[in-house]
Amino acid sequence: MAVPTINAAIGTLYSEHVNPQWVRLLELLEMNVRYEHCSGSELFTADGRRILDFLSGYCVHNIGHNHPRVIAALREELDRKGPAMIQSHVSEGAGELGEKLCQRAGGRLTKVFFASSGSEGIEAAIKFSRAHTGRAGLLYAHGAFHGLTCGALSLMGDPFWREGFGPLLPGTEAIPFDDTDALERKLASRRFAAFIVEPIQSEAGMRVPSAEYFRTAQSLCRRYGTLLVLDEVQTGMHRTGPFLALHHWGLDPDMVVLAKAMSGGLVPVSATLMTEAIYDSVYGSLRRAIIHTSTFSENGLAMRAALATLEVLEAEQLGSRAIEAGEKLRTRLRQALDGYEMVKAIPGKGLLLGIEFTAPRSLRLRLAFEAFTRIHPAMFGQIIVMRLFRDSGILTQVCGNHFMVLKVAPPLVVTDSQIDEFVSAIAGVVESAHASPAFWSEALGLARRAIRI
Ligand SMILES: Cc1ncc(COP(=O)(O)O)c(C=O)c1O
């Protein structure tokens, strides 16, 4: 079935004035549809299709798209014509939101710096940890994704993201994830201000560390005077069950960065939570009252949307839903995909899951697989994404730093029947990858088109 493409005028203007390569990529994948309205886990297109969202905008839509409670809170804020961007006042919602976030995070986290994106949250963590420790070094883990601004990018080793943008921050060093010996060897130099790390590495393929990793990492960081900063931009806001993924291991880090799902997918916002002492190292005197700030931080709409999002997460008990639905999804995926030689594992926690594929062993499949991974290593994953979208109306994507892992991260409001729908669609695609020569010939066709483009 041919999928109608985006309204031509919109696409042309976007290509002319924004990013033509993005339009070409979406066209190639037959995913360039025009979404008209979105609700819960469903997206409705201008040509009458209904798409099931199993990506959640990379963990933005935990409470589902356009939740009425968040929309009502935003309407109320707009209707009252409240203070916006005055820049010389105390933001009304920020204190209340700060208190609620810190209470839920627990431990020693009592202060918050608000900004508008996850990358900005990481930038704050970099500056604040340097200010607090007086050290310049920053440690991060292989496979990490922390954002694409220069500081955050300096904490991501993958040459793909860095190429052409250097030189980046000096003093950053990478260690293997889930390796406390490697961590201790670096920390012992006492050069590092912070170890910035995701509790579960989403873009690296939904990597969950071994049970003791973070508790040991936390005590090592304390021993050597390095701050433990947890990047919960994807894992936070009940995505894996508890409010933060760190709660799985009872951690008490020095800083936590939140963004994405914080404001119901409607207003950009991020929060860097930290201890009182770290905050004081930055804003410790009147002279430094606005030493680190940003025009849009603490803006009224973001604060209102985030407060309403917290209410929804709790009223609808979406943390327990993430655990229960995640277990169901994982069990159903295991049953449906068991025995396929290209399916290696179902990693992740709660509703932050992945399907990890691996190169086939049998000669028949291996030749085709190798032919087109030589063209581009993401090609196999993109065919799966494309087939799910085109044939079953399901939106997914592969992990940004591990192309052989398909993300499975629906909104936390996903229903049991939507889970069944996804499982039967992915089972169909995986079956055709293993059994149908047409899957591979179509894949090679796409690869050739990609090269021509
Ligand atoms: C774990 C993690 N940290 C930080 C970021 C950066 O967030 P943003 O894109 O809002 O700058 C991302 C973005 O995907 C992320 O996944």
Image: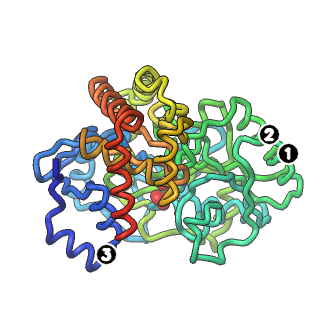
- How many badges with numbers are in the image? 3
The residue lying toward the viewer, choosing from 127 and 440, is 440
Tell me if I can see residue 402 in this picture.
yes
Q: Is 262 above or below relative to 410?
A: below
Residue 293 position (above or below residue 333):
below
Q: Secondary structure at mark 1?
A: helix
Can you give x and y, in whole percent of width and height, for residue 38 in the image?
Answer: 21, 46
Separation (CA) of disc 2 from disc 3: 47 Å
Kindly identify which residue carries mark 2: 219
The residue pinned by badge 1 equals 223
Asked which secondary structure carries label 2, the reply is helix
Q: Is residue 264 left or right of residue 379?
A: left
Considering the numbered disc 3 on the image, is that residue within a helix, a strand or a loop? loop
- In this view, the residue in front, 346 or 231, is 346
For discs 2 and 3, the disc positioned in front in the rendered view: 3
Answer whether residue 104 is visible to the viewer in this image.
no
Are circles 2 and 1 on residues that touch, CB within 8 Å? yes
Question: What quarter of the picture does the C terminus occupy?
Answer: bottom left
CB within 8 Å, label 3 to label 1: no
**Which residue is rendered at x = 37% and y = 31% of the image?**
431
Could you give the CA–CA distance between mark 3 and mark 1, rounded to whole angstroms?
49 Å
The residue under label 3 is which amino acid type? Val
Inspect the image, locate mark 2, and give the three-letter code of the amino acid beneath it.
Answer: Ser
Q: Residue at x 38, y 54 (%)?
A: 444
Q: Which residue is mark 3?
A: 18
Q: Mark 2: is the Cβ under 8 angstroms from ligand 1?
A: no
Q: Earlier in the sequence, mark 3 or mark 1?
A: 3
Q: Are marks 2 and 3 in contact (CB under 8 Å)?
A: no
Q: Position of residue 325 (x, y in %)?
A: 40, 25
